[in-house]
Image: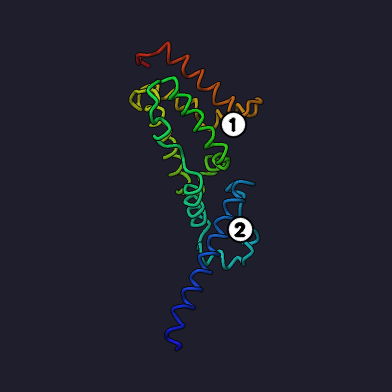
Amino acid sequence: MKLTKRPYRLGRRGEAAGETRRRIVAATSDLHAEQGIAATTMRQIAARAGVSVGTVYHHFPSYADAIAACGAYTTEHVPAPTDAIFAGVPSRHERIERLASAAFDYYARLPVLGSVRRDQAIAATLRKFVKQEVVHRRRLAALAVGADAQDRRSALVAALVDFDVYQALLRQGFDRSAAAATVAALANAWLDGNDRPTDA
C-alpha cells in the first residue's frame, strides 16, 4: 500500500512546488512592474508571494535566475506583435498604422520594458531581451515599409515605434491610440517623400 501511495504524494508535492514557483514568478513580475527590476529584492519577492526567503532561493538560487523566469513568464503572457498584424494588408500606409498600433498596445501591456532597458546591466537575460526586441522591431518595420531591415526607411519607422517615443507622447498628453495614429501619420508622410532609399 505504501508503494502505491508514494507516487501520489510525490505528485501532489510536485504540484504544490509548481504552484509555489508560479506564485514567486508572479510576485516578481508584479514588483518589477511597480518599482523596477533593480529596486526589487528577494526578500520583497518572498513577502509578496507569501513564502520564506529560503523558499525563493530554493526555486531560484540567484536573483538573476528569478529575473530569467520572470522574463519567460512575461513573454508567455504578454507576447510581442508578430508578422500576423500585416495579414491581408497590401497598403504600406495601413501596414505602418497596424505596426504603430500593435507596438504601442504591446508597450501599454508591458510598462516594465522601461525598467528592462534601464536595468539591463544587472542581468544577461535583460541584455539579451533588449537586443532581441530591437531586432524584432526593426524586422517588423522592414515588413511594414517593404524594404530591407538595414534600409534607413525601415530604421526611421523602427525608431518612431520605439518604447521611448511612446512614453514621450504619453507624457505630452497623447493617449495610446492618438500616439499610434500620430506616429503612423508622421512615418507615412516621411515615407511618401522618400520612396527610394538615399545615401546616408
Name which residue lies at 55% across and 28% down. Answer: 165
Residues 153 and 199: in front is: 153
State the residue lying farthest toward the front.
88
- Residue shown at 58% from the left, 28% from the top: 177
Residue bearing the label numbered 2: 45
**Other-residue count near label 1 (Cα within 10 Å), few / some / many at <14 / 14–19 / ≥20:** some
Q: Residues within 10 Å of mark 2 (few under 14, many from 20)?
A: many
Regarding mark 1 in the picture, which secondary structure is present there?
helix
Give the left or right position of residue 130, taking residue 110 as reference: left
Q: How many marks?
A: 2
Looking at the picture, how far across and down is residue 196, in whole percent?
35, 14
Residue at the limit of the structure toward the left, as seen here: 148
Which numbered dot is residue 5?
none
Q: How is the image coloured?
A: rainbow
Residue at image coords 51%, 52%? 70
Quarter of the picture holding the C terminus:
top left
Task: Where is residue 87? Give x, y as percent.
Answer: 39, 31
Image mark for residue 167: 1
